[in-house]
Amino acid sequence: MSEAKTCPSCGKPSPELLRLDADLKGRLGSDLNIKNVPDAVCPNCYNNFGSRLAKDAAKKSKRIAKEQHRLNLWRSRVHLVRDARERFAIKDFPGSVVAYEKYFRVLEIIYEVKPNGITAAHFNNSARSKELVVIASAYWDLMRIYDQSPRFAKRLEQCAEKLAEFLPLTPVYAEIVRKIEDYKKVAKNKEHFDRVLRMASRGKRRCFIASAAYENADALDVQILAAFRDEVLLQTPIGRTMTSAYYLISPAIAHYLDRSPKIRGMTRKTLEEIAVHVDRKYNLKSKLQ
């Protein structure tokens, strides 16, 4: 009768020890993170190791399938947004809503949040920050659609809140603000569009004329002029009065610049000189770094 041997894994006596080949030992170490894998173990431990490896492989396979599904969803959003915009352009508003809402559902699945739970914080990664523009534009389109019927009052309110959250973080801030100002004249629910303007302005107040002249709200000169407003003008009573007056007249002027390339170019040259002057005097560029 053979003498019982002690299993180096579980420490129990066993009539025999089964040898682990190099491949199996390697998988136990890499896949299950088992340190100092013995050369041989009892049949019970051998079967247990096999079962654990099978379960780990199944989990990995499920995780890979899930990631692939998420990747496919992320790619599908491009088609959904394009479809939504095309339908909006031809006034197929129900179709546009369906495509946009599917787009937001994709985002909710990817980021594992509840309906209407997508926030700007989900896009603080620079690789996906451009999505902010897409989201803001989608909410802007949806607001105009939902504004058409009192049945969608709740969804209109939700879109207004989301647009106000995302819009200040995008380079299309000034452009959409001007469009909101224009649209308010015919809006059925003017209070929601006023609310967007009010809430968004707390997050960022753009130099409308400068943004229109440069066609880029994030241009360095635009940032310098915005810093001059915040660091200099808004620090004095007369400066605050001037700034308030500017925001009353600037949307209309910016709207005109959008339609006049020649005047836009002349305005840009003037603003370049002003930006150089105020930067030289107040050293604003260094504060933007």
Image (cartoon, rainbow, N blue to C red):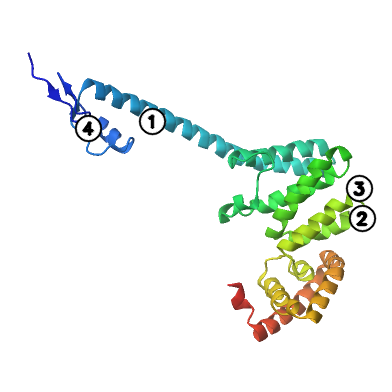
**The N terminus lies in quadrant:** top left
Disc 1 packing (10 Å; few <14; some 14–19; many ≥20): some
Residue ID at (84%, 51%): 192
Disc 1: which residue: 56
Residue at the limit of the structure toward the front, as seen here: 12
Disc tally is 4
Disc 2: which residue: 185
Disc 3: which residue: 188
Disc 4 packing (10 Å; few <14; some 14–19; many ≥20): few
The spot of residue 262 in percent (x, y) is 82, 71
Foreground tag (2 vs 4): 2
Residue ID at (76%, 71%): 210
Q: What amino acid is labelled 3 in the image?
A: Lys
Q: What amino acid is labelled 1 in the image?
A: Asp
- Work out whether mark 3 precedes mark 4 in sequence or the reverse, and give the earlier one: 4
How far apart, in angstroms, are the residues tagged by discs 3 and 2? 9 Å
Residue at the limit of the structure toward the top, as seen here: 1
Q: Tell me, for residue 22, which label it has, or none.
A: 4
